[in-house]
Image: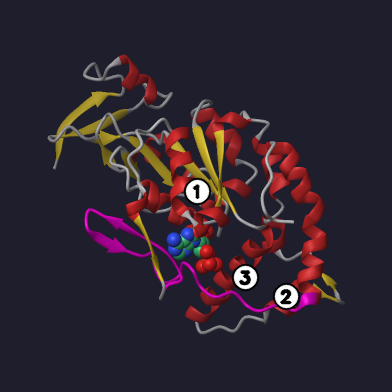
Amino acid sequence: MPTSNTKNYTSSHLSNEEQSKKATVEGTLRYVVHLNGTSQYLPHTIIIGVRKGGTRALLEMLSLHSDIAAAENEIHFFDWEKQYQHGVKWYLGQMPFSYPHQLTVEKTPAYFTSLEVPKRIHRMNSTIKLLLILRDPIERVLSDYTQVFYNHKQKNKSYPPAEELLLKNNELNTDYKAINRSLYEHYMEHWLKYFPLENIHIVDGDLLIRDPFPEMQKVERFLNLSPQINASNFYFNKTKGFYCLRDGGRDRCLHESKGRAHPQISTFLLGKLRDYFYKPNKKFFELVGRTFDWL
Ligand SMILES: Nc1ncnc2c1ncn2[C@@H]1O[C@H](COP(=O)(O)OS(=O)(=O)O)[C@@H](OP(=O)(O)O)[C@H]1O
């Protein structure tokens, strides 16, 4: 239970190191301290996207680590104008209660493709570590389509077949939003105006699906976490067709909305998508000094 006891953000019970880990807005915010010593902190790291990249899987897998405190819901603070107007105190209030040694993390996949967001995060904390999970841009388009298809289905609305939306007069319909969201190079260039590359760790979303443990080891290292997540935390679930999590003897898979079958597309459309993403993908590799298995 929270106490009525509020303290300044620069509370003296924190060591210098702990204090420096906390948000840059120290002194301006107050937070409630639970009797058990937990309180709310601004995120030390944010999973900024990409939509359908595997952000939920990444957050759940990171939460296997005892030094991680994750916000359950997508907060949309930096990309939704109305939320942003609530101010940073409101944002702080959305964070989970955690111990001073823990790192707070939130994920909002839409941040990566929202042009206002980098500037706003930078204003809050210019040295924050960011996590970005990307997968093959074509897979991401199909995953995005599938998501919207099911959103419509839930509301008993119909949604055109993928082929119909992605092609216009036998050419790729580049006005389709999901295609634009897969132009990683465009958005990355913008983020790099605000944050150095070494502060943005890119998780390979295709590898995270195929073999999550090595990808998670890299994330632990990036966040300077002790190596705690291990191979036995993951097991392949044949029915789901994905890795699931094993945590203290408890097995769990991601929600059924994660890992849905994608529509079959013609080789013609696939060819068009490959041609379209070839150059932006190459540019992206140059930008981040690393290649991915996307071409
Ligand atoms: N272990 C595991 N289990 C299930 N699903 C997994 C896993 N790892 C990665 N993924 C992939 O995550 C994709 C969904 O991505 P996001 O969580 O970022 O989607 S969202 O933007 O938050 O809606 C989701 O996309 P779809 O396959 O299109 O459903 C999955 O491919």
Q: Are marks 2 and 1 in contact (CB under 8 Å)?
A: no
Instruction: Determine whether, in the image, residue 114 is placed left or right of residue 271.
Output: left
Residue at the image point whose x is 63% and y is 78% from the top: 263
Residue at the image point whose x is 15% and y is 34% from the top: 4
Q: Residues within 10 Å of mark 1 (few under 14, many from 20)?
A: few
Up-down relation of residue 72 to residue 124 (above or below): below
Is 249 one of the magenta-colored residues?
A: yes
Is 71 one of the magenta-colored residues?
A: no
Q: Nearer the viewer, residue 277 or 4?
A: 277
Residue 82, labelled with which disc?
1
Q: CA distance from mark 3 to mark 2?
A: 9 Å
Residue 165, labelled with which disc?
2
Image spot of residue 105 (x, y percent): 40, 41
Instruction: Determine whether, in the image, residue 286 is placed left or right of residue 62.
Output: right
Q: Are marks 3 and 2 in contact (CB under 8 Å)?
A: yes
First in sequence, mark 2 or 1: give its number.
Answer: 1
Mark 2 or mark 1, whichever is nearer to me: 2
Q: Quadrant of residue 57?
A: bottom left
The quadrant of the image that shows the N terminus is top left
State the extent of the magenta-drawn residues as a range: 240-267
Ligand 1 contact, mark 2 (Cβ < 8 Å):
no
First in sequence, mark 3 or 2: give its number.
Answer: 3
Q: CA distance from mark 2 to mark 1?
A: 31 Å
Which residue type carries mark 3? Tyr
Up-down relation of residue 80 to residue 162 (above or below): above
Image spot of residue 268 (x, y percent): 81, 76
- The residue that disc 3 covers is 145
Q: Nearer the viewer, residue 216 or 151?
A: 216
Ligand 1 contact, mark 1 (Cβ < 8 Å):
no
Mark 3 or mark 1, whichever is nearer to me: 3
